[in-house]
Image (cartoon, coloured by chain):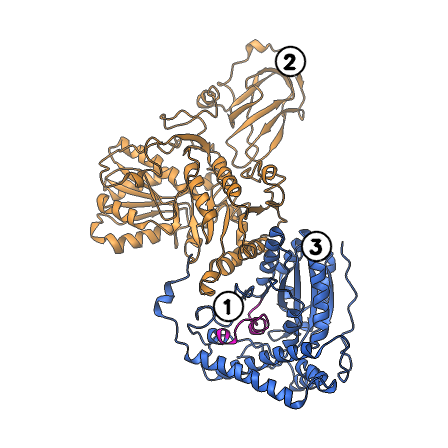
Chain colours: A blue, B orange
Amino acid sequence: MATATAAPTATPEPESEARPNVSRDELLKYYREMLLIRRFEEKAGQLYGMGLIGGFCHLYIGQEAVVVGLEAAAEEGDKRITSYRDHGHMLACGMDAKGVMAELTGREGGYSKGKGGSMHMFSKERHFYGGHGIVAAQVPIGAGLAFADKYLNNGRVTFTYFGDGAANQGQVYESYNMAQLWSLPVVFVIENNQYAMGTSVKRSTMSRTYWERGAAYGIAGEEVDGMDVLAVKAAGERAVAHCRSGAGPYILEVKTYRYRGHSMSDPAKYRTREEVQKMKEERDPIEQVRSMLLTGSHASEDDLKAIDKEIRDIVNEAAEFSKESPEPDLTELWTDIVA
Amino acid sequence: MATNILMPALSPTMEEGTLARWLKKEGDAVKSGDILAEIETDKATMEFEAVDEGVLGRILVAEGTEGVKVNAPIAVLLADGESADAAPAGGGLGNASPEDGANLAQAPTAGTPGTGDSPTTVEKKMPNSSAEAPVPATPVSPVAQGPSGQWSAEQLSDVPAGTATKTMTVREALREAMSEEMRRDETVFLMGEEVGEYQGAYKISQGMLDEFGARRVIDTPITEHGFAGIAVGAAFGGLKPIVEFMTFNFAMQAMDHLINSAAKTLYMSGGQMGCPIVFRGPNGAAARVAAQHSQDFAAWFMQVPGLRVVMPYSASDAKGLMKTAIRDPNPVIFLENEILYGRSFEVPDLEDFTIPFGKAKVERVGQHVTLVSFGIGMTYALQAAEELAKEGIEAEVINLRSLRPMDLPTVIESVKKTNRCVTIEEGWPQGSVGSYIGSQIMQQAFDHLDAPVISLTGKDVPMPYAANLEKLALVTVPEVIEAVRHVTYR
């Protein structure tokens, strides 16, 4: 039986020091990827406000370090699956911003030809398995992807993301049980942003150290500071190594925070403005990397400005594409129902 | 006084079993609680204890005999001092009927084609069920009972005339289909509760663990929600899972994955990613297991776009449809029936026998009324047709087999000839399969109807436990006959 490793401290290290063994290129990569998610989501919020995006739209702003850090620990061919707050995961695994944005606007050029929307996108090419609208349904499915990898003995690992809300669903524990029973190579990533829709962890949950619940099944795990991309990456590497060694699943409870509401229609009455503001000012994942780049003399303000512009261009291009791409042909109503 | 020891029913649906071993021999004293024999049912091997005391006078059924009907005398228990010669040789005592005795005399597994009543044909032995005649087996080759010119050979039979057949049970047909496909395709695997070491709760997967190993025949914990989700993920990940639900009642726990995860992904992904998976297991009423374990979900599943839904009647249907289901790139709901598992039918003896989805089979040709059914409902339809023929009413009996896609053209074609239709199913009436068929007939063949379509269903109640009430809750042959008289104005 695997033993749970101790949780590292959740306190971020001083921001003023660039860490050893982190190259300039690496930091710039994380900065760029997190910034792409941030700007993309801001744009999506804007398009939603303009009525170009409808229905549910769950933004990832504030949580960028989670997917960017874990993607840095993944190898080509590894799989990922998540809930409906999925735009960041898609961008981080290399899916095209244009295709994601056009899906949000329900257009032909979207990843699902406009038939899935914000919550339901997939990319076989990038090994992204959704985009699932039912809270926690992706957890056994993710374990099943890992089941297939183990069956095919291909050495791949699946990242199965879910929130603190989903972590109270029964099927999560059914999945833990079978994943450990069958030694499935799956990293269960609990993105604990502290609010299940509008209900805080304190109001919904006994035993609030979610990762420790794996101990009941003999699953190793740890807590990670989800605002620190380097900490996330390091934890992701430990998790992936554990899975690839054949030791079975691993749990990462990533402490994060979403700046925006649960969805676009969230009145945000359940937390104070000050709480959100404090998090943005003191813990922002992008600012942390930005500061490392600058203080470590890895990049100048001008360098970063150039990156900002580059990202804005990508996002604007995606937005333009998502507006120009036509709505799906009416015949699409009747396609893709059965293969 | 000598008493007959009768073949016990050791499971709710057991209608016959194998007398595996006698643990007492003739002349042995028997006390109550002694193990008399080992009896193998369709589910397990059970020990059979003596209730009364005495001396085992005569053994009427030798050990190793298969297909011994429930309630058939298997031995004679003598009171102390009584002579074995005084004992009757089966029948005449206890509850055994002459019919049971007659069945005992036959070789239980050898089919006798042509009689329409093979020895392995089983009949529910319920109190007050004497009115029910044995269920006719599917005709081996189509026998035109009326003008049949309108039907092509294909609609009447899945294989060309003269194709060799072999007799097998629905259970064996399912096992053979799965095993053939697993030999053919390494990515096919079976998972579910008790499919491996237990050899299948209903013995469908018996022997498969031995052949395919624990990597491909996987015992799961009792967590339908979780393992259905894992199987869906495995299908997304490139495998072709067969998920056995011990019964479809438990599939309700997994409904979200069947509907939201399996059925919709192809559409939601714009055609990028589908879910090739088979969810199978017994569905519908079993026998005496009451409300939570007796219900037919055909109409529920049939409603969902993205699913394939099939419900075989015969062993031939089961074999051909299962092979098609495993190869199909879509999620397939494969609704079996516990009571049909043990019934024998002729199955084409072909290397690779498949039945396409969406193709009904005209099981019996007739011109006076169309009976449409599927799954176990076919037993009522065929039996009623047999009875009605004696009165000169020739019923055309259509076995739908797949409910989604549904072969409505065959139904409409038949109704255009007979101008009358009765549908038969065990599910509930509101939103039933039959009500859909009725509405389609009304829309597509209104001018051809000479009477309103009658949809016969199970009664609109949760299944009761009491034997008499249970019988009342299910659709019956007399109800089918009455409905036919009604639509034919006789």
On what subunit does the disc labeled 1 rest? A
Whether residue A131 is situated above or below residue B99 in the rendered picture = below
Whether residue A247 is situated above or below residue A8 in the rendered picture = above
Q: Residue at x 68, y 89 (%)?
A: A300
Q: Which mark is residue A29?
A: none
Q: Residues within 10 Å of mark 2 (few under 14, many from 20)?
A: some
Measured Cα–Cα span from mark 1 to mark 3: 31 Å
Q: Residues within 10 Å of mark 3 (few under 14, many from 20)?
A: few
Q: In the image, what residue type sits under mark 2?
A: Gly
Q: In the image, what residue type sits under mark 1?
A: His
Measured Cα–Cα span from mark 2 to mark 1: 74 Å
Would residue B435 appear left or right of B192 to someone viewing this image?
A: left
Whether pointer 1 and pointer 3 mark residues with C-beta atoms closer than 8 Å, the reply is no
Quarter-of-image position of residue B113 = top left
Q: In the image, what residue type sits under mark 3?
A: Gly
Quadrant in which the C terminus of chain A appears: bottom left
Q: Residues within 10 Å of mark 1 (few under 14, many from 20)?
A: many
Q: Residue tagged by mark 3? A: A246
Q: Read off the magenta span.
A: A82-100
Can residue B88 be seen here? The reply is yes
Q: Position of residue B301 (x, y in %)?
A: 44, 54
Q: Residue at x 56, y 19 (%)?
A: B62
Residue A83 colored magenta? yes
Q: Residue at x 64, y 90 (%)?
A: A302
Whether residue A263 is situated above or below residue B118 in the rendered picture = below
Measured Cα–Cα span from mark 2 to mark 3: 61 Å
Q: Residue tagged by mark 2? A: B27
User: From the viewer's perspective, is the residue at label 2 or at label 1 nearer?
Assistant: 1
On what subunit does the disc labeled 2 rest? B
Q: Which mark is residue A120?
A: 1
